[in-house]
Image (tube, rainbow, N blue to C red):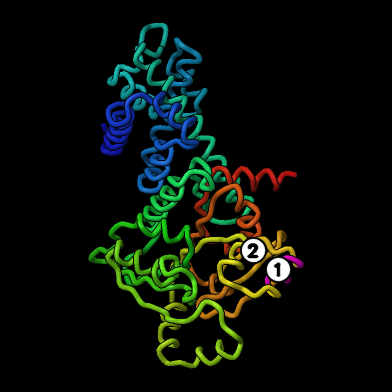
Amino acid sequence: MSVRNQWKNNQFSVLIFYFFTVHGSLKVYEGLYKSIGGNPLLSELKVLEIIVPDMLEVVKQRYRVMQNIFWMQPIGRRSLAEALHLTERVLRSETDYLRQQKLIDSTKSGMSLTKRGEKVLEELDVLMDQFFGMDRLEKKLASNFQIERCLIVSGNSDEQAKVVADFGELLNDSLHRLLPDGDNIIAVMGGTTMAEVAKHLTILETKERHNTFVPARGGIGEAVAIQANSVSATMAANAQGAHRVLYVPEQLSEAAYHTLLKEPSIMEVLEVIRNSNCVIHSIGRALHMAARRKMSEDEIVRLKQKNAVAESFGYFFDENGQIVYKAPRIGLALEDLKKIPFILAIAGGKSKAKAISAYMKNAPQQTWLITDEAAANEILKGATL
C-alpha cells in the first residue's frame, strides 16, 4: 500500500472513530439539530474541512463508493468504476480498505454492503445530506457575491448564541490556515459579534510567524467591551501576539478629524494600520449602528430618507450597495481593502441578510465571508426573486 493510501485510510478510520466513539450515533445529532436549530457535528466538520481538506475528500469518495454499491449490489468492480468515473486501480484501493473494515463483502456475483456497512451508510446519509447541501450553499453564496469563499454555520445567530461561538471557531481556523510566515498586521473592527468571536482565538504565534493586532478604526465612545481597541486586545492576548492601540473618538467633526490626523502618535499607529495584510470585520444594520454610535437625529433622518440598510467601516449603504453616507472616522477606509490580501467578514442572522447583501456588493474579491444558514438562505431567496 502506498504512503498516500495509508494516510487516506488512517484519515477515514479517524473520522469513523470520531463518529461512533466520540459522538455515538449520528441520530443523536438529528435530535439536537431539531431541538437547538443547528448541528454541532456539522460545524465541527466545517472546521475539519478548513484544517485537513483531504480528510473530507476521502470521506466523500468512500461515501459515494458505499452508496453506489448499495444501489447496484451485487456489482463488479469494473461496472462500479465506470459508474463512479474512477480508474479500477483507484477503486481497488478504496474497496480493499472498505473490505478490511468489514463494510463490504465480495463474492463471484460482485460486491455488496455488509450489515455493518448498511448501518454506517444509513447514519452517514444523515450527515452527508447536510454537509453536501451546506457545501453547495457556500459555493452558491460565494459565487453570488463574487468573493473567494463563504463559510456557513448551521443555525440562526439571531436566535442561537452558540452560532456566534461557531463563527469564532471558523475564524480561528481560517487565520491558522491563511496567515503566512513572517510579520503579520491584523486590523480588527469592533462590535458585539467581533467581541464574541475574539474569545475563540487560540495561539497563532510560531517561530516563523509573528502577529500584531491593531484596531482598524477609532472607536472610543461605544461600550468599552465592544470597541475595536478592546476586541483587538482580546484577540492579541488569546493569539499571544502583539497589540497597538488607537485612542481616538468614534464620532468626529470634520475639524477634529483633520486635526487628529496631524498628531504624531496617531500618525504612527495609522501607518501600522495601513500596512495591515489581514482585516477582520463585521457588517451592521444601518439604523441599529447609527443609534449605537449616537449619531444625531438629522443624520438618522438622512439615513432613513436614503434607505440605508448596512454599515461597515463607517460607510452606510442602501440595498443596491451604493454608499449613501460616510462618517468621518480615523483608520482603514473602504478603498484600503483592495490591497489587503486577507479579509474576513463575519455577520449572520436572518435579520442581517439585507445588510450583508448590500455591503458585499462592495467587498473585494479576496474576502472570506463567515455567516450562518439563516442569513445565507434569506440572501439567496432575495437574489432569485
> Residue at 70% across / 70% down in the picture?
324
* Disc 2 residue crowd, few under 14, some 14–19, many 20+, Cα 10 Å: many
> Residue at 57% across / 43% down in the picture?
374
Query: Residue beneath label 1, please?
Result: 303
Position of residue 280 relative to residue 54, above or below, is: below
Q: Dots 2 and 1: beta carbons under 8 Å?
A: yes
Task: Give the magenta range.
Answer: 300-305
Position of residue 334 measured from the top left corner of the image (x, y, whole percent): 58, 72
Q: Quadrant of the C terminus?
A: top right
Position of residue 73 relative to residue 308, above or below, is: above
Query: Residue beneath label 2, please?
Result: 287
Q: What separation in Å lies between label 2 and label 1 (alpha carbons)? A: 7 Å
Position of residue 44 relative to residue 339, above or below, is: above
> Residue at 44% across / 27% down in the picture?
31
**Count of marks overlaid on the render:** 2
Kindly indicate the quadrant of the structure image that contains residue 358.
bottom right
Q: As drawn, which residue projects farthest toward the front?
A: 297
The amino acid at mark 1 is Leu
* Disc 1 residue crowd, few under 14, some 14–19, many 20+, Cα 10 Å: many
The amino acid at mark 2 is Leu
Please tell me whether mark 2 sits on a helix, a strand or a loop. Answer: helix
